[in-house]
Amino acid sequence: MSLRTLDDLVEIEGHRVFVRVDFNVPLESGAVADDARIRASLPTIAELLDRGATLVLASHLGRPKGKVDDALITRGSAERLQELLGRPVTWLAHPVPESLPADPVVMLDNLRFDPGEEANDPAYAGRLAELADAYVDDAFGAAHRAHASVSALPELMLASGRPAVAGRLLQREVEVLGQLLRDPARPYVAILGGAKVSDKLAVIDALIDRVDAILIGGAMANTLIAANGGEVGESLVERDRLDDVRATRTKARDKGVLIEVPQDAVAAAEISLDAPRQTVPATAIPRGLMALDIGPRTVESYAHLIADAKTILWNGPMGVFELEPFSAGTRGVAMAVAHADAFTVVGGGDSLLAVKKAELDDAFDHLSTGGGASLEFLEGKALPGITILEA
Ligand code: ADP
Ligand code: MG
């Protein structure tokens, strides 16, 4: 699979390019609290401006459900972008204005303020299409959704003979994650954690066809342990997924893929900073306690497997890393991955936050900007925002 990219845009000097960015950023009183996603789009924006294009940028933000929500306007992102670019960004208080000012960089308001966005409405996409001569998609985080700005809009652009291509961020995501699907260096180890096994069963199933080992942490480990008859106390468990989990383990055994679950856990009666905690066997969590992090023996054994890997994919924290007393497992795994002599990829909003907290962002080969999108991509699914850009 290969994508059309900025290299395929020939005549753009003086032309208006619609750039679908992913500025779905956390806000604190209207200001951008974490600008990683804005920074990630800078290469594409700078390259287009260098080549003399004028830009109209657009993103979704949160879930306003087709109505204007003052708490979810994109003005904060436009302001942050202006600082990062060092040139004016004109923000328009509308997701699809009738016309655009001639300013070189214009940013629209939250696309999801219009119900046409999530409905993939061709009429709405048509109004967006009128704003530009070419289309660039750099919003990997939205690529798994068939929404107007990533699906109907590029379709319309192509149908009317205008180019629709991937920006540098989207291009790199597809190159890196595509490599993990095609021909990863072995051993290939996946580390999966986070809150819910139901979010990640499909990707675990798909990864069994490709990896050598899967190391499980986070709350989802409890569901695997419970499915094997372990005692998990009051830990978060998805009882309705026990059969699915057993089927997944059978598949792994048949394929010779190692699925590792924690040996020990840090447990407490409640999720709080000062709750007394103890390290206990992960299959024998005492009554009244919850497993809230993987224990030190698990970190050590995972670190050995990680050290031998040549490709590592990590998605999902190993414990309640937001609270210091339950963050050692996630930090330990992050350090092991950072030091491995392997190609390392991390994805997932919370996982990225954990990597940042440990100040290890530079130690990974690729920080994927897409949570759901990267998981669906790694399942081998066709993503609507990507197929439309294929050459
Ligand atoms: P990501 O955003 O990286 O994909 P998820 O959203 O799947 O990760 O999961 C992250 C959440 O899982 C965090 O809020 C974390 O506190 C929670 N979590 C991890 N381990 C546990 C656990 N043992 N018990 C309860 N919650 C957990
Ligand atoms: Mg998350």
Image (cartoon, helix red, strand yellow):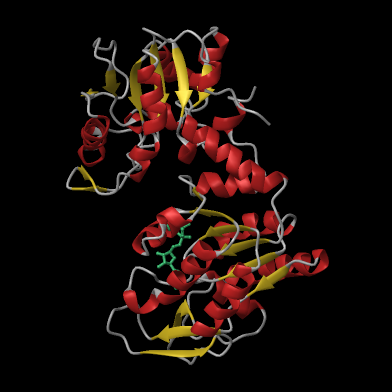
Going by the picture, which residue comes out furthest to the right?
Answer: 254
Residue 291 percent location from the top left of the image: 47, 81
Q: Which residue is drawn at 39% across and 39% down?
A: 40
Residue 149 horizontal side relative to residue 80, left or right: right
Q: Is residue 74 above or below residue 161?
A: below
The quarter of the displayed image where residue 187 is located: bottom right
Residue 305 shows in the view:
yes
Give above or below for 174 relative to 86.
below
Q: Which residue is drawn at 28% across and 28% down?
A: 109
Quadrant (top left, top right, bottom left, bottom right) of the C terminus: top right
Residue 264 coordinates in the image, percent (x, y): 54, 85
* Picture coordinates of residue 25, whole percent (x, y): 32, 44
Image quarter for ligand 1? bottom left
Image point (23%, 24%), residue name: 89
Residue drawn at (37%, 86%) of the image? 269
Name the image quarter holding residue 292.
bottom left
Q: In which quarter of the image is residue 171?
A: top right
Report x, y in % for residue 100.
27, 12
Q: Is residue 121 visible?
A: no
Question: In the drawing, does residue 265 fall left or right of residue 128?
Answer: right
Identify the image quadrant of the N terminus. top right
